[in-house]
Image: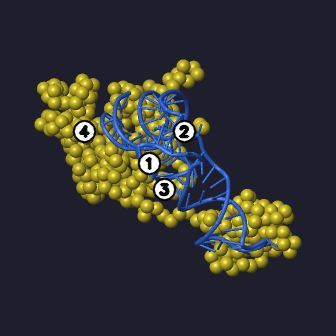
Chain colours: A yellow, B blue
Amino acid sequence: MIKGIKGVKDLLPEEMPRWRFIEETARRWATGYGFQEIRIPIFEITTLFARSIGASTDIVEKEMYTFQDRDGTSLTLRPEGTAGTVRAYIEHNRSSDPVPQKYFYFGPMFRHERPQAGRLRQFHQFGVESFGMADPRADVEVIALLWRILSDLALPGLTLEINNLGYTSDRDAYRPQLIAYLRQQDVALCGNCRRRIETNPLRVLDCKVPECRAATEPAPRLADSLSEKARAYFTGVLAGLDAIGIPYHLNHRLVRGLDYYCLTTFEVTTTNLGAQNAVGAGGRYDGLVETLGGPPTPAVGFAVGLERMAMMLPETALASAPGAATVYVAGFGDRGSAAGLSALEELRLVGIRAVSDFRSMTLKAHLRQADRLGCRFTLIVGDDEVTKGFGVLRNMETKVQCDVALPSLSLHVLPILRGS
RNA sequence: GUGGGUGUAGCUCAGCUGGUUAGAGCGCCGGAUUGUGGAUCCGGAGGUCGCGGGUUCGAAACCCGUCACUCACCCCA
């Protein structure tokens, strides 16, 4: 038996109502906030991701699905959506359009990690990117959108954490202080963090190992090294969140795994997801567009994991299941089967949802199917009905039956369906 | 990449210290009702016991290997 790839899941029909509900909620809110949908490729030139996400990040170092095109070009299945969106923004000269550009997207992302609860190799994200506004209100807008979507879905146990990473120059000033401190604490840190002192010292602050947390508690704080401008910006963001009633927690340890973030970073976590507690996250990335060859363009965005939202979505949040097929056509016997097929098509042509089970040879079997499928009506067409020229339309709930002329069938069925 | 757990029917799972034809519930198909569904009763189909090797008179069970799934570390959505 050929099986699916590890960490890649099928979404079966039973799960679709929940997914549709999530997607429609996200799309509705995003549209309401003035974002426009964009669809970009799921694979790109490898260097796009290496340059934007950061060469020394885990994603680029060991999690990308990279392969060679036939001409030898290195291509990669996208591990996240921002890089491609920025590429498209630059490539189509979007910056020359007058208004701020705000996009949202849905789609699969790919990371070669060991699967576990809430973590897959192909997973799906909804994300937004807001280009062109270096104003705290743009950050607030994006965070508000994220919070409103998650709240509207009634996802339980949510916390919004937020931090200020400052400008690149702020981090450059801070990094030597932190490294100096971490070197003193060397022995108290886990092996991973000891390595990170050189590669990515800020990440040490975000380590979950208790010993590392304790060791870094007295460490110099990035907040103390921030420039006045960065502080003022962050104050503006927090004031905006306060003004529109978005609850947040400051977390000075919050460091995101992608290199392009600056100033505002945020993450929404939950207590209901097992070990993977992040539902969505994002931040400001003012330098990225320029890094990828575009004009200097401030930008801010976020992404949420659809699987993680789906896992948390309470059953009660789901609207009632979409209506089942309304008319079951029970055609049986030599002539009845043939007439049934015609009747089925005729109903469908006028927009009536109609189904049948072609295996069923007896009326009893047909009615059982109709019942199981939750059909409200069954059209009975056996040989007798064909002879008379009238089918029997049975209301499955009331058991009331009436004859309907088989020629011009839909004309007779439609009023009965409307009247029920 | 590193650990732990689990693999028996379509699904959820029994199966004792190894013992002869491997079970249940649900689901599926059919019958009771030769053209009228849901309930009930009766019957039926469906299994290389994850795979390979070993121990044994005998293995679903014990041993070794392997694969898959899963949870966790790491990291992240």
Q: Are marks 4 and 1 on the same chain?
A: yes
The residue pinned by badge 3 equals A18
Q: CA distance from mark 2 to mark 3?
A: 22 Å
Mark 4 falls on what kind of element?
loop
10 Å crowding of disc 3: few (<14), some (14-19), many (20+): many
Same-chain status of marks 3 and 4? yes
Give x and y (percent) for residue A1: 60, 38
Mark 3 vs mark 1: tell me if same chain: yes
**Residue at label 4?**
A208
Closer to the chain start, of discs 4 and 1, is: 4
Q: Nearer the viewer, mark 3 or mark 4?
A: 4
Q: Quadrant of the C terminus of chain A?
A: bottom right
Residue A4, disc: 2
Q: Are marks 2 and 4 in contact (CB under 8 Å)?
A: no
Residue type at tag 4: Lys
- Please state which amino acid type lies under the numbered disc 3: Arg
Q: Is residue A211 visible?
A: yes
- Mark 2 vs mark 4: in front: 2
Q: What's the CA distance linking mark 3 and mark 4?
A: 32 Å
